Amino acid sequence: MGRSPCCDESGLKKGPWTPEEDEKLLQYIQKNGHGSWRTLPRLAGLNRCGKSCRLRWTNYLRPDIKRGKFSQEEEQTILHLHSILGNKWSAIATHLPGRTDNEIKNFWNTHLKKRLIQMGFDPMTHRPRTDFFAALPQLIALASLRDQLAAAASGDPAAVQMQGAGVGADVAIQAAKMQYLQCLLQSAATTIASAGSGGSTSSGAISAHDADAALAATAALSSPPGNSSVPTPTAMGHSGGQVPCTFPEAPVITSDVEANLRLLGADGFTCHGGSLPPLADLSDVTNPVADWCSATAASSSCGGGGASSPFPWPEFFPDDPFVTDFL
DNA sequence: AATGAAGGCAACCGCAGAAGG
DNA sequence: GCCTTCTGCGGTTGCCTTCAT
C-alpha cells in the first residue's frame, strides 16, 4: 500500500514534454503497447518516470482523444453525472468517449463550477445555495443599521430627531426583523458548522468558506453596538459550537417588537429555546431539489418545481415581503 | 506599448486499492 | 496474512496565454 517510489527517483526529467519525447513514447507504445509503465521509460529511451509517461499517453497522446471545445451535450452529461457521482472524474469520463478525466476535471473547475455558482447553485450539491450567503451584503448592512438603532435607543440627539420625524415605528420593525434574521442565521451557522467539522463528506457539501460566512454574518448581527467590525471565524473560536443567539445588551424584544414579530407570522419565535427548525440536509446529493440541468441549459431560473421550495425552511417562512427581501 | 490580473490547461504530487509474491 | 510493487485517481500547482487597464 506504500507509495510508488517511481517519482521519487532523482535525475528524471519533469515538466513539459518535448515533441521528441512525445514521438519516442508514441512510437514505442504503438509498436509494443505500454506494458508495464514502470519499465516503459527505460525501454523507450525516455528519461521520465512511468507515471509521467502514463499521464502523457492517457491525457494527450492517445489516438482516440477528442480535442476542442465541449459540446452542449457533453456539458449536460458532465453536469448530470457530477450531480450523481460527484468528483468521480474517471467515472464521468467513461461516459464521454474521447475525453479524459483530467480534461473533464479542468473543464469543470474552470467553466461549469463557476457557472453554477453564478446561477446560485452549490457546485457540490447541485442544489440552490442557501441564499442568505448571497444576501450577505444586506446582512452586513443590517448589522450597521443595528448600530444606528442602538445609538437611537441610547438617546443620541440625531436619533431623537429621527423619532421626531416619525421613524419610531420603522425602527421597531427593523429591530424585530433583525432579531428574526439573527436567529435564522444562528440556526444555519450551527448546522453548517457541525456539518463541516463532523461529516467531512467526499462531496464536500458545505464549504468551510460558507460556514465561515454564516458565522461571520451571525457574529456581525450579534456584535455589540459600536463594534460593527465583523470578527473572523478564527477570532470567534470557530469550532462548530453554538453561536450565542442573543444580543449582548439587555432587553431586545420589546412589546413593540413582539407585536411586529406576530405581524410577521413568527409566532412562537424564541431565540434561546432554539425553536427554529434545522436546515435541510444539504449533503443529500442524491435528491437535488431543483432541476439545475434545465436551468443551466436554458440559463433560466430553477423554478419548475411546483411544490418544492428552494428554501431550507419552507414551512417556516412567513409570507411577509421582508423575508423575500432577504432571500 | 507595457504591465498586471485572470483564465485555461498540462503536469505533478500523494493517497489508496489491486495484484502478485 | 503480510509486504511490496504497480496502477489509477483526485487535488493541486505552476506555466503560458489572453484580457483589461
Image: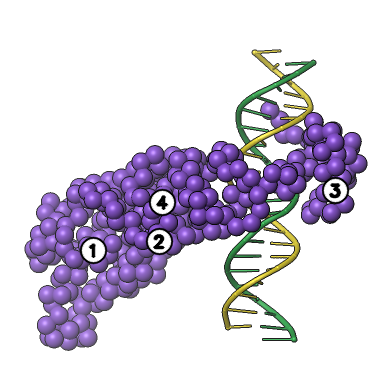
Chain colours: A purple, B green, C yellow
On the same chain, marks 3 and 2? The answer is yes
Q: Name the residue under label 2.
A: A299
Whether residue A149 is visible here, answered yes or no, is yes
Query: Toward the viewer: A68 or A278?
Result: A68
Q: How far apart are marks 4 and 3 (CA)?
A: 41 Å
Chain name for mark 1: A
Chain name for mark 3: A
The residue carrying pointer 1 sits among few (fewer than 14), some (14 to 19) or many (20 or more) residues within 10 Å by Cα, namely few
Whether residue A12 is visible here, answered yes or no, is no
Kindly indicate whether the residue at mark 1 contacts the one at mark 3 (C-beta within 8 angstroms). Answer: no
Chain name for mark 4: A
Disc marking residue A23: 3
On the same chain, marks 4 and 3? The answer is yes
Query: Tag 4, which secondary structure?
Result: helix
How far from the left and from the top, in percent, is residue A163? 14, 82
Q: How far apart are marks 3 and 2 (CA)?
A: 44 Å
Query: Tag 3, which secondary structure?
Result: helix
**What residue is rendered at 69% in x and 44% in y?**
A64
The numbered mark, 1 or 2, whose residue comes first in the sequence reads: 2
Kindly indicate whether the residue at mark 4 contacts the one at mark 1 (C-beta within 8 angstroms). Answer: no
The amino acid pointed to by label 2 is Ser
**What residue is rendered at 17% in x and 74% in y?**
A171
Question: Viewer-nearest of labels 3 and 1?
Answer: 3
Q: How far apart are marks 1 and 2 (CA)?
A: 22 Å
The numbered mark, 3 or 1, whose residue comes first in the sequence reads: 3
The numbered mark, 3 or 2, whose residue comes first in the sequence reads: 3
How far from the left and from the top, in percent, is residue A261? 13, 61
**What residue is rendered at 27% in x and 59% in y?**
A182
Disc marking residue A293: 4
How far from the left and from the top, in percent, is residue A216? 39, 60
Q: Distance between the residues labelled 1 and 4?
A: 25 Å
